[in-house]
Every structure is written in C-alpha cells, then in structure tokens.
Amino acid sequence: MSPVTPASVQKLQTALHAKAKESPSFRFYALYDKVYRKDVLAFAYACCRANGGATGVDGQKFEDIEAYGVERWLDELAQELKSRTYQPLPVRRVYIPKPDGKQRPLGVPAIRDRTAEMAAVLVLEPIFEADLQPEQYAYRRDRSALDAVKRVDKLIYAGHQEIVDADLSSYFDSIPHSELLKSVARRVVDGAMLHPIKMWKFRWKKPTSTETNIGVRETGTTVGVLRKGLRSARCSAIYTCVGSCSGGSNSGTRSV
C-alpha cells in the first residue's frame, strides 16, 4: 500500500504545480532546499520502504536502517545534501532473463540514493506534470496502461481508425542524456538542484557491481547508467514531450 502524502508535502507540490501551470515559461530557481526538507525526505523514505526492492552495493537493508534509527539516518542524509557533500554510490547492476532469451539490465541503487532521488522526484514531478500533454499516460501519477487502453477505445468509437503500435528498443539506454538534461533545465535553473541529477544520470567510469540472474558477481565500469531510482522512465517522458509542449500537434493524431 502506498503511503499517504503528508499535508505539508502536498501543499508544496500543489504550489509548485500551480505556478508551473500558470506560467509555462517560468523557470524555477530555488528548489534544492526543498529536497532535504525533513518532511520531504521522510515521505521519500516511506515511499521507498513501501516499494521494497533489493539492496544496493552497500548491502544496507531497510531493517538495518530501522535498527539504526530512521530519523537519525534521515538527519545524516539531510546534512549531506544540505552541505552538498552528498555523493551517490555506484549502482548494482542485475541482469534478468527476457522472454526472447536476451537479458534485461536493471540498476539497483542503494537505499540512501533511492531516498534522495525520490525526494527530488517529489519536488520536480509537480512542475513537469503541468507541462505533459493529456494524451500521455506512461509513468504518471494516478495513470496506468489500462487508462490508456480505455482512452484508445473511446477514440476508436469517436472515428479514429488507425492505431500505431511501436516500441523503442533499449530506449532508456539510448536516450541522449545531454538533451534530457536540457529538457529539465528548460524549467529548472537551480544549479544546486541540477547537480545531483547529473550525478545520478551520468556515472562516468565509476565501478559498478554487476550480478547476473544466476548470481555471478563481477566488477566493471559503466558509462551513463540510467538510474531507476530517479524514475528514468518519467524523465524520459519529460524528454519525449518537449516537442509537443514547444510546438503544435497534428489534430488528427492522438498518442497515448
């Protein structure tokens, strides 16, 4: 069960969304201090706890954090973020088998990094939600693939007769990172906020623990690991919507 958003966090998100919706060209310049706010970090941790997941390279479990003291652990993370000494750990890469016999790589960040990344998502998501088109359903809060299917069904009955079913191969691995960050910077000019995003998105020549589905672990280097913890899919949705947000669209075409 997903944790309930605290009133204070909800108030912050509502204000950010309202400003973004009201002023499409407004660029936010003071966001980073919201990331290490006590209520935001606590809710971010609760979201990560609810999602569960495997441990990162440090081997730290949620049970370890709870034994240490969640509030104490969050205070230490907040201090690292506030003092700007925070450095993300390498990502543990796990390969899982796909139906076609190939393997899908998954990046597993440490819980501390997941929490910091989730806090950033809580602050940034309301801003970019205001820019996304109503036809976009992927990786958005309170929307699902089933909602997209229902929308397609309505469009068919409304007279639209052509459907294009497409899948971009290894999209999260091949998306141009520099263009993605430019898409974020179109709305966010807070350098302190952009810095950790760059650290999460670009892991240049940093050792990454790698583990196959049969449990064999090896160490190598990874270039530009996309961080699942930062909701890379949502960031990619931001990138793909830039064209439709910046210009017109074909009135005879609907995309979900």
Image: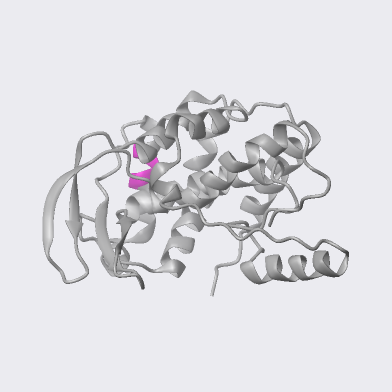
Please state the extent of the stretch shown in magenta in the rendering: 76-80
- State the residue lying farthest toward the front: 162
Q: Position of residue 119 (x, y in %)?
A: 49, 48
Quarter-of-image position of residue 17: top right
What residue is drawn where x is 32% and y is 39%? Answer: 224
Q: Position of residue 56 (x, y in %)?
A: 26, 57
Can residue 205 be seen? yes
Q: Nearer the viewer, residue 38 or 218?
A: 218
Q: Main secondary structure of the magenta part?
A: helix
Q: Position of residue 197 (x, y in %)?
A: 43, 36
Query: Magenta stretch: residue 77 in it?
Result: yes
Relative horizontal placement of residue 216, taking residue 64 as reference (left or right): left
What residue is drawn where x is 36% and y is 31%? Answer: 83
Quadrant into which the C terminus falls: bottom right
What residue is drawn where x is 40% and y is 35%? Answer: 196
What residue is drawn where x is 62% and y is 30%? Answer: 187
Relative horizontal placement of residue 73, taking residue 197 as reference (left or right): left
Q: Position of residue 107 (x, y in %)?
A: 32, 55
Can residue 38 be seen? no
Q: Nearer the viewer, residue 218 or 64?
A: 218
Residue 251 to residue 135: above or below: above
Q: How many marks?
A: 0
Query: Magenta stretch: residue 166 in it?
Result: no
The colour style of the image is one colour
Residue 163 to residue 230: above or below: below
Relative horizontal placement of residue 17, taking residue 109 as reference (left or right): right
Quadrant into which the N terminus falls: bottom right
